[in-house]
Image (cartoon, rainbow, N blue to C red):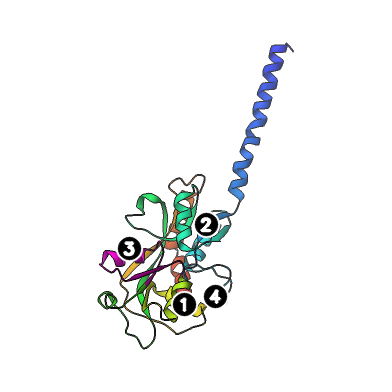
Amino acid sequence: MAPALKRRGLAALASGLALPLLALPRLARADAPLEVIASDIRPLSFPGTDPSTPGRRGITLDILAEAIRAIGRSPRFTFLSFGDAVDRARSVPGTLICPLGRTPAREAQFTWVAKVVEVPQAMGTLPGKPVLDLEGARAVPRIGVVRNGLQEVFLRQNGLDNLLVLETGRDLALALAEGRIAAWYATEPEIHQQFNAIGRPGGVRTGPALQSIAAWLAAHPDPRDQPIAALRGAMARLEADGTVARIYRSYASG
């Protein structure tokens, strides 16, 4: 074989070998667990296994885990405080977060992948104290809300500034139980679940729903290699076949 032809043949062979080698990292990523940033927002999401709901991770994460498995991946949930989870998801490309509420202020900060479920928001107060609607909330000295949450935005938009902002639902449950705040505005099921978690089952009651917030799966505006379209399709199928309603009912009844 002439030297020039031999060199071209070797180059073609090397090029052909390089293609599958270059593809290996992408194939490895496709088989890797899909990581989602979450926070302790009971019963929407909670770390580990809650003794009251063995083997489960909360309404939104159980639904999301079904969607992730439906596209041939496995889920891995990393828990941070809610404020830190939001900060991470809007600053680190490729990050997924669930659950997250969608607002005009957040619209451009995230890629909105799919709505998971809608949940009511209400004021939690201690037994023996009045349940609160929006007008009643104006008269109390302190209302607790979580940092970076939609609840703070809603109350401030409605003219309330008697707010105490804390990091986690557990912090807020303790603050209410200890009398450091008069009310806690949050996802209605979370208020009861967090009181269960601090050893005060039945130690709180909630007023009327003041708003309903959709809990979303979202991603950084640059989702990188995340399977956004596949997740959207899987979530739509779970909604259509009744899986979302079944999982929600399992927590509401249990």
Q: Is mark 3 on a helix, strand or loop?
A: helix
Point out the frontmost of discs 2 and 4: 2
Q: What element carries label 4?
A: loop
> Which residue is farthest bottom?
128
Point out the frontmost of discs 4 and 3: 3
199 part of magenta stretch: no
Crowd tier of the residue under label 2, counting other residues whose Cα lies within 10 Å: few below 14, some 14–19, many 20 or above: many
- Separation (CA) of disc 2 from disc 4: 21 Å
159 part of magenta stretch: yes
Task: List the residue tagged with mark 4.
Answer: 53
Residue 36 — which label?
Answer: 2
**Quadrant of the drawing holding the N terminus:** top right
Point out the frontmost of discs 4 and 1: 1
Tell me which amino acid carries mark 2: Val
Tell me which amino acid carries mark 4: Thr
Q: Do the residues labelled 1 and 3 touch (CB within 8 Å)?
A: no
Residue 153 — which label?
Answer: 3
